[in-house]
Amino acid sequence: MKRIEGASKGEYVTSSLTFHEAVTIITGLTGGSSRDASLVNGVVEPILNLKGLKPVPLTSDDILRSKELMDEHALDYDSLHLAAALSAGSKEMVLNDRDFDLVGPKRIF
C-alpha cells in the first residue's frame, strides 16, 4: 500500500471489479449490507483516495481474454484482474496469488 500511496497518479491500476469484491468481502466479514451507503463509502473511498491508483473499467475484451487466460494457465476467474492489467499495459501486479507467477506481469506483494 505504501508503494501505491507514494506513486504518481495512475502509476498503478485496478479493475473496477476490485470495488465490488472489497464491498462483498467486508459485508461478509462484518455482517453488514451492501445497501448501507456509509459502509460502502467506508470501503470504496479509501481505495479511490490512493494517490497512485487509477481504477480502470472492465471491457468485453477483458472478459473474453480472462476466459482464454483461465484455459491457457489453469487460473480461476481472478483472471479478470489479469486481463485488465494486460489491457492497461501493466508491468507488475500487486497481489498475493501465486497462480499468477507464471503468467503476464511480475507479481509483487
Image: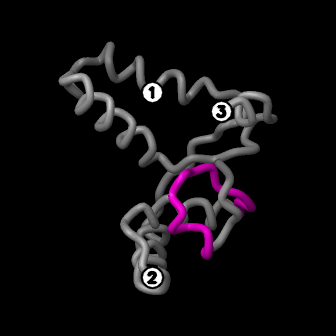
Q: Amino acid at mark 2?
A: Glu
CA separation, marks 1 and 3?
15 Å
Label 3 neighbourhood size at 10 Å, few (<14), some (14-19), many (20+)? few
Question: Pointer 3: what residue?
Answer: 1
**In terms of depth relative to the viewer, which is nearer, 65 or 69?**
69
Q: Is residue 96 above or below residue 84?
A: above
- At 43% from the left edge and 73% from the top edge, which residue is drawn? 75
Mark number displayed over residue 7: none
Judge from the rendering whether residue 27 lies leftward or rightward of residue 85; answer left or right.
Answer: left
Name the mark nearer the viewer: 3 or 2: 3
Mark number displayed over residue 68: 2
Residue farthest to the top?
38
- Please provide percent x and percent y for residue 23: 34, 33
- Please provide percent x and percent y for residue 62: 48, 68
Q: Secondary structure at mark 1?
A: helix
- At 36% from the left edge and 41% from the top edge, which residue is drawn? 20
Q: Amino acid at mark 3?
A: Met
- At 64% from the left edge and 40% from the top edge, which residue is drawn? 54
